[in-house]
C-alpha cells in the first residue's frame, strides 16, 4: 500500500494505491495526508479500509503527482551522514548528527521543476531517504523506541545551492531553502512495509548519467539514531519530514569543473521500494 496526493499545487487530494497498482479515493477518511491524519493512526485506518473493500476506485489518469504529505510543520535535515560523502567533500566524520533546516514551503511534487535560483552557479542534487513522523517524539528514552514514531518513508531530493550554503556566510539554510528545493515522493510508503530502512539502495542520474549509487547501509547515523537524537533537541510532530543525508556522487564532490545543474538538465532518482522521481531544472 502507498499513500499519494494527486492534483494541482494547492488542490491535491488524498488517495491510496494498492499493491496491484489500483488507486482508491481516500477522501472519505481524511481531507488530506497531513499531521492530523497521521497522528490519528491514519495509515492503519487507510490500510484497514482498503483491505475491507470500503474505498471507491479512483480515476487518476492525467493528474499531477504532488508531494505525498501536505506541507510539513518542519523539514529537518542531516548533513554529512554517509561515510563516503563526507570523504568526497573532505569533511571529517561527524561525532554527532549535523542538523540544519529547510523551509517547509520548498516541498513540491516529484515531477515538478527544480528552479535554479537567480545568480546561482552551484545548484546541486542529493538523493535522500525521507522519514515522515507519525507520532510525537519528545525526549525519547531510547534509540529502540524511535522507529515507533515513524509513519513512513519517501524519496527526497535535497536540492542545494553550494555557494549560498558554504561561501556566503551564516548557516547552511540559505543554500537549502530556495524555491522548489525539495521534490518529494511519489508516495508515502508505510513504515510497516519497509522492513529495514538501513538496507535500501538509492540512485540518481543527471541527463541519463548515473551520479549516485549507494545504500543506506553507509549511513553514519541510522534512522532510529537520528529520530532519537532529534527528540532531545526539538519536538518532532506528526507530519514533520526528516531528510537523512545523501551518499557520495554530488556535484560538489566532483573534480573541477564541477557539473552543477544548468537549465534543461533532467534529474532522475529512486530508492528501492519507494518509487522514482524525475525533474527538469529550469532557470528561476
Image: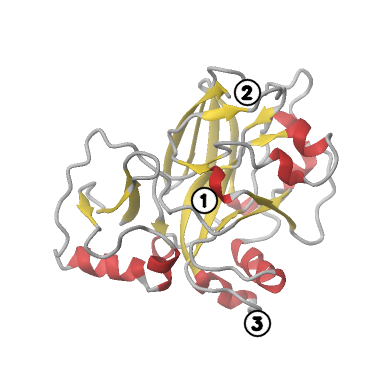
In percent of width and height, residue 10 lies at 39, 44
Q: Residue 181: percent from the left, percent from the top?
A: 58, 38
Determine the CA span between mark 1 and mark 3.
Answer: 27 Å
Q: Is residue 18 above or below residue 54?
A: above
Report the residue marked by disc 2: 261
Q: Is residue 152 above or below residue 158?
A: below
Determine which residue is flagged by label 1: 200
> Which of the two labelled residues, at mark 2 and mark 3, occupies the earlier sequence position?
3
Crowding near the residue tagged with mark 3, few <14, some 14–19, many ≥20 C-alpha atoms within 10 Å: few
53 left or right of 260 in image: left
Quadrant of image for the C terminus: top right
- Residue ID at (76%, 45%): 172
Horizontal arrangement in the rendering, residue 278 relative to residue 243 (left or right): left
User: For the view shown, which residue lies furthest in the bottom direction?
Assistant: 141
Mark 1 or mark 3, earlier in chain: 3
Image quadrant of residue 175? top right
Q: Which quadrant of the structure image shows residue 29? A: bottom left
Horizontal and vertical percent position of residue 279: 48, 29
Q: For the residues marked 2 and 3, what is the alpha-carbon distance in whole angstroms?
A: 42 Å
Residue position for label 3: 141
Q: Nearer the viewer, residue 124 or 191?
A: 124
Q: Earlier in the sequence, mark 1 or mark 2?
A: 1
Q: Nearer the viewer, residue 28 or 194?
A: 28
Label 2 environment density (alpha carbons within 10 Å; few <14, some 14–19, many ≥20)? many
Q: Secondary structure at mark 1?
A: loop
Q: Secondary structure at mark 3?
A: loop
Q: Position of residue 201 (x, y in %)?
A: 52, 45
Left or right of 8? Residue 135 is: right
How many residues crowd around disc 1 within 10 Å: few (fewer than 14), some, or many (20 or more)? some
Horizontally, residue 217 falls left or right of residue 267, namely: right
Identify the residue at image location x=64%, y=42%: 177
Amino acid at each position: 500500500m502507498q499513500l499519494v496526493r494527486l492534483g494541482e499545487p494547492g488542490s491535491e487530494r488524498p488517495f491510496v494505491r494498492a499493491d496491484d497498482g489500483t488507486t482508491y479515493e481516500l477522501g472519505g477518511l481524511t481531507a488530506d495526508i497531513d499531521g492530523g491524519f497521521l497522528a490519528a493512526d491514519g495509515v492503519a485506518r487507510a490500510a484497514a479500509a482498503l483491505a475491507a473493500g470500503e474505498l471507491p476506485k479512483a480515476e487518476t489518469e492525467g493528474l499531477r503527482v504532488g508531494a505525498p504529505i501536505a506541507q510539513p510543520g518542519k523539514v529537518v535535515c542531516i548533513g554529512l551522514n554517509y561515510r563516503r560523502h563526507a570523504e568526497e567533500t573532505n569533511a571529517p566524520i561527524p561525532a554527532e548528527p549535523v542538523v540544519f533546516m529547510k523551509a517547509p514551503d520548498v516541498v513540491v511534487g516529484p515531477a515538478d521543476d527544480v528552479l535554479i535560483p537567480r545568480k546561482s552557479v552551484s545548484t546541486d542534487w542529493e538523493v535522500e531517504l525521507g522519514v515522515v513522523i507519525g507520532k510525537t517524539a519528545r525526549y525519547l528514552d531510547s534509540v529502540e523506541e524511535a522507529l515507533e514514531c515513524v509513519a513512513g518513508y519517501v524519496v527526497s531530493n535535497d536540492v542545494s545551492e553550494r555557494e549560498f550554503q558554504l561561501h556566503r556566510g551564516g548557516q547552511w539554510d540559505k543554500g537549502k531553502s530556495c524555491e522548489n528545493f525539495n521534490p518529494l515522493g511519489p508516495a508515502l510508503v508505510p513504515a510497516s512495509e519497509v522492513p529495514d530502512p538501513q538496507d535500501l539502495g538509492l540512485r540518481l542520474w543527471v541527463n541519463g548519467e548515473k551520479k549516485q549509487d549507494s545504500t543506506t547501509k553507509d549511513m553514519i547515523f541510522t534512522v532510529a539514531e537520528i529520530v532519537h537524537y532529534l527528540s532531545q533537541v526539538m519536538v518532532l510532530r506528526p507530519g514533520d519530514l526528516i531528510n537523512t543525508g545523501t551518499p557520495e556522487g554530488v556535484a560538489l564532490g566532483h573534480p573541477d569543473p564541477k557539473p552543477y545543474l544548468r537549465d534543461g538538465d533532467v534529474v532522475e532518482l529512486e530508492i528501492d521500494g519507494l518509487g522514482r522521481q524525475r525533474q527538469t531544472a529550469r532557470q528561476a
